[in-house]
Every structure is written in C-alpha cells, then in structure tokens.
Image (cartoon, rainbow, N blue to C red):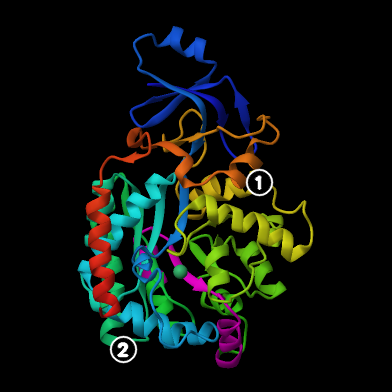
Amino acid sequence: MIIQPDWLVASGEEVSANTAVRVHDGVITHVAPPGELVAQFPDDEIVDASGCALLPGFVNSHVHLYGTLAHGIVIESPPTGFESFLDDYWWPQVEDRLDQEMIGAATEWVCAEMLRSGTTTFFDICEAPGALSGVLDVEADHASRAGMRGIFSFEATERSGQEIAERSLRENLDFIDAHQDDALISGAMSWHTVFTCSPQFIERAADEARVRSTWYHAHCNEGTHEGNWARENHGMDTMAFYRELGVADRSFLASQCVQMTDSELAIIADTGTRVSHMPLSNCEVGGGIAPIAELLAKGVTVGLGTDGYVNDMYEVMRGAFWLQKARLRDPSTLPAHSVLHMATEGGAQALGLDYLGRIEPGWTADLQLVNCDFPTPIDASTICDQLVLWRSGHHVRDVMVAGEWRVRNGEVLGVDVDRARRRVVEEASRLWGR
Ligand SMILES: [Zn+2]
C-alpha cells in the first residue's frame, strides 16, 4: 500500500511535505514523492491521509500494565515520601493483592488505550507475587489479540521471601525461552532494585539473561532512597555497585535514573547502559526530575515511558519537554524533535529493537497517522513543536503495527473497548475491596 500524508515526520529531525510511504509485507519499502510511487506501483492500495502527519508508532519503554487498576484508588493514609509510597501504599494495597484475572483485564484495556494513542510497542514490568506463575502468558495473550509489539518481564525481587524470588526468576526465564522466535512478543529479565535484591540474586538474573542473549532491566534511583541505601549497605552509589557486579553494560536498561550523582551519570555513559525516562510518574512519587538533558549530552540512549501512570505518550512527551526546561531554567534544552526521538527511535534502541522507530526503507512499518487540523499554519521547522505541544492521543487517526492496521478512524480493531472497560472496572473494584 502507498500512504499519502500531508507531512512525513521520518524521525525527530527529518520532516518533509509531499512525501509518500510504501509498505509491503510489514516493512517500509519506499519513501518518495506520491506521483513517483503510484507510477511505479500502480496496483497498490492508496491510503489517503491528507490532513494528517505520518509518524513512527510510539515506543513506551516502561509500563506496568496492571498500573491502571490503581487509577483513582482511594488511599486511607496518603504516602509521605518515596519509601512510604512503596511500604504503605503500592506494595500492600496494589501489587500484593493482584491476581491473574485483574492483570488480564488491565492488559486488555491498556493495550487498547496505548494503540488508540499511537503506541505500537511497549516494555512491560509485572510485579504481582500473587499472580505467579503464568501471568506473563496471560498478558501476552491479550497483547497478541490487540496486535501489539510487546516485551514482557516479571520484576524479580527477594522482598517477598525466597520462594517468590525463585518463582519470579523462573517466570522470566520460561517466558523468554517460549518466545525466542515470535515476531511481536518477546521476554526480557527484570529485577527490582538494589534494596530488594541481594548481589547474588542480581548476578544470577543477569547471567541467566546473558545465556539467553537477552537484556536485563531494573528500577534505578527513582528517589533518594536507593542511592542512600546503596551507600550505607554497599559503600558506594547504585550505579557504581552495578558496575562492580559487572551488570552495568549495553545489556542493562536502567529505568527512572532520577536522583543520580555526577559519577553515576558518567558510569551510565561509559558502560553503554541504556535509560528509560518517565517524567510524569517521577512527579507522582515525589522522586524529582531526572537529569535527561545531561544524559543525552553524554550520548546515552534514552527512551520514554509511561510507568503505567498516564499511558498517553503525547502527555509524557509534554512532561519531558517542560520539566527539563524548568529544571535547567533554559528554554533551549530538550527541543521537541529530541523528545519525539526519545518517544520513537530512542525507545526502540533502549529496548534493543533494530530498524524500529523511524520511517525509512527497510525499517518496520509501525506507524501512526495524526490529525493536523492545527489553528495555525504548519511549517516543516516547527511541526515537531506543534505535535509535541498541541496533540494528544485522541488526535491519532490510524495506527499500524508491522504493516497491519490496528486502529482505523480512531477505532481500535482488535479489542471490544466497551467490554474491556467494564471488565477493568469490575476487577479494580475487587482490588480495592469494594
Ligand atoms: Zn516502574
């Protein structure tokens, strides 16, 4: 097929008008003026996308699919800091109460929500000791039905005892092994943090991932707590500890990275550690604002994620765009095209996915068409600002994953959205104890 948009945003910095894109067998084969492509491929279906911009689909490089079940939850005693957020709220009232039915319902809903707002790929981290074993299969079933590209992991931790710790590692390994050859679904290794996992446990998790040629992930310094804990218990910063363990390298995705020392930023850059940035949820937990401009300046690969909090990547892009400027008191930092890059190609690189997140011949056809009915004229030099600042998920018209339409005219094709919503309401009520 030949898609003919008004504007093509091939990647953050490459924008052109009057350019069409040919998709064949799930891959972008040509990017050229529409007349040329139609003459060369007269039998192709023409997709009229006038009034729209064509962008790569978003890559949500960090989501907790179950997170949606806690949206609007009534908390008896609101958390007073990052530690209390986990100890008094998130662990006892959410994660430790989850079961597979709740997580399945949330997954179906969040997949629809992500597709509807232009996200085609995600990395999920599930932590729910009561949902072991097999919860990753439940999630992957729903993602497959929606037609999304998903990488799944279970957040292995020793906080709930050794039996759960072993089963959580096993959950990851079984899933990674079972999906080695799938086109859209795969697995990766996750552990929680240095304050919930022993050095031996972390080393084992990383070793098992390496044997399977996959990468590994952890939450890192989401607030000040983990860094302080690492210095008190291991005598060094979190990232220095990871380097000492031999896990800080190109296979490591460190999420959050909010409260970092200068030497930790240098370790990330020197070791090729990748980073996932979640500006909105960092605000939610009172964690702070991550030094993303500094990491990008050092050449670090950074993706954007929702953390399961606000799952519309347009909102997350705005958060990243504004917060760095406010933090550094510099309106020139993190321009819109850099934010778009993090939400697409940067995220794909953070997840180790090649040929994804850019519109170029030979790259995967994960695409979104966004309505461009702005109230001001559009210019190639400012369209990225227009998209980042004045679009939201509901402006997304069509979404394609690997060459297959998954959203047409704002309608999610593979999910009964009304039924899915009713199911999440039911399961959330059960979680909340109502
Ligand atoms: Zn998270």
Instruction: Give, as a single range, the part of the protein colored magenta.
Output: 206-233
* Quadrant of residue 187 within the rendered picture: bottom left
Residue at (60% x, 34% y) in the render:
374
Q: Is residue 88 above or below residue 322?
A: below
Residue pointed to by mark 1 = 336
User: Label 2: few (<14), some or many (≥20) within 10 Å?
Assistant: few
Indicate the secondary structure of the residue bearing disc 2: loop
Query: In the rendering, which numbered label is found on residue 97?
Result: none
**In terms of depth relative to the viewer, which is nearer, 372 or 180?**
372
Q: Amino acid at mark 1?
A: Ala
User: Label 1: few (<14), some or many (≥20) within 10 Å?
Assistant: many
Residues at marks 2 and 1, CA–CA distance in whole angstroms? 45 Å
In the rendered structure, which disc, 2 or 1, sits on the residue that comes first in sequence?
2
**In terms of depth relative to the viewer, which is nearer, 91 or 219?**
91
Residue at (67% x, 68% y) in the render:
265
164 within the magenta span: no
Instruction: Verify CB contact (< 8 Å) between mark 2 and mark 1.
Output: no
Residue pointed to by mark 2 = 161
Q: Amino acid at mark 2?
A: Gly
